[in-house]
Amino acid sequence: MPERPDVPLAWVERLREVLDVFPECHEETAWTGVRWRVGQATVAHIFGGEDQLFRITFRAEPDEVMAFQHLGAPYFKGEWGGNVVGMLVDDDTDWDELAELLTDSYCIQAPQRLAETVERPSA
């Protein structure tokens, strides 16, 4: 079985800048890669695949899940959980867009009292 590559530290640091500001959102080592959680709910998970590509998964509203599924690469629908979507991460990733998607993911996963304290991206 091929080895999974480690996520580049520069990418993890960029994600920390976005996710560490959210109330009660914490980083932890995942089964592979790194994930951020609020309580026991995963907000984001970045990891390297056996195909040597990097992916980040996060949560989206139901209507957005279908949109991501139809957009195709670099987006995909997770094979687990009805609201899990993700995108391939590489040197061409739009980090501003990803920050907006992760903000939405946090607000979906966090208790309402925490989500209400976060300014969401405008539609």
Image (tube, grey):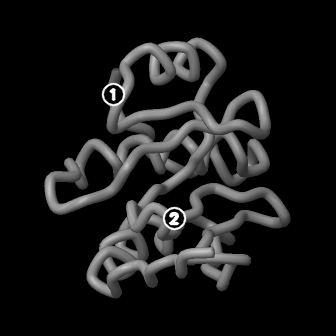
Q: Residue 21 in the image: x percent, y percent?
A: 47, 70
Is residue 84 found left or right of 39 in the rendered image?
left
Is residue 110 found left or right of 87 in the rendered image?
right
Q: Residue 41 in the image: x percent, y percent?
A: 79, 57
Name the quadrant of the N terminus: bottom right
Residue for badge 1: 122
Is disc 2 placed on a helix, strand or loop?
A: loop
Is disc 1 placed on a helix, strand or loop?
A: loop
Mark 1 → mark 2, Cα distance in angstroms: 32 Å
Q: Residue 22 in the image: x percent, y percent?
A: 54, 64
Residues 84 and 99: in front is 84
Is residue 86 found left or right of 111 in the rendered image?
left
Extreme right residue here? 40
**Label 1 vs 2, first from the N-terminus:** 2
Please rate how many residues cluster around mark 1, counting C-alpha atoms within 10 Å: few if below 14, some from 14 to 19, many from 20. few
Q: Quadrant of residue 40 in the image?
A: bottom right
Q: Quadrant of residue 5 in the image?
A: bottom left
Residue for point 65% across, 18% down: 62
Q: Amino acid at mark 2?
A: Gly
Residue 49 got which mark? 2
Residue for point 25% across, 59% down: 90
Q: Amino acid at mark 1?
A: Ser
Residue 106 got which mark? none
Residue for point 45% across, 84% down: 6
Residues 74 and 109: in front is 74
Name the quadrant of the C terminus: top left
Residue for point 42% across, 44% down: 87
Please rate how many residues cluster around mark 2, counting C-alpha atoms within 10 Å: few if below 14, some from 14 to 19, many from 20. some
Marks 1,2: beta carbons within 8 A? no
Look at the picture and state if 79 lies above or below 41: above
Look at the picture and state if 55 lies above or below 87: below
Extreme front residue here? 1
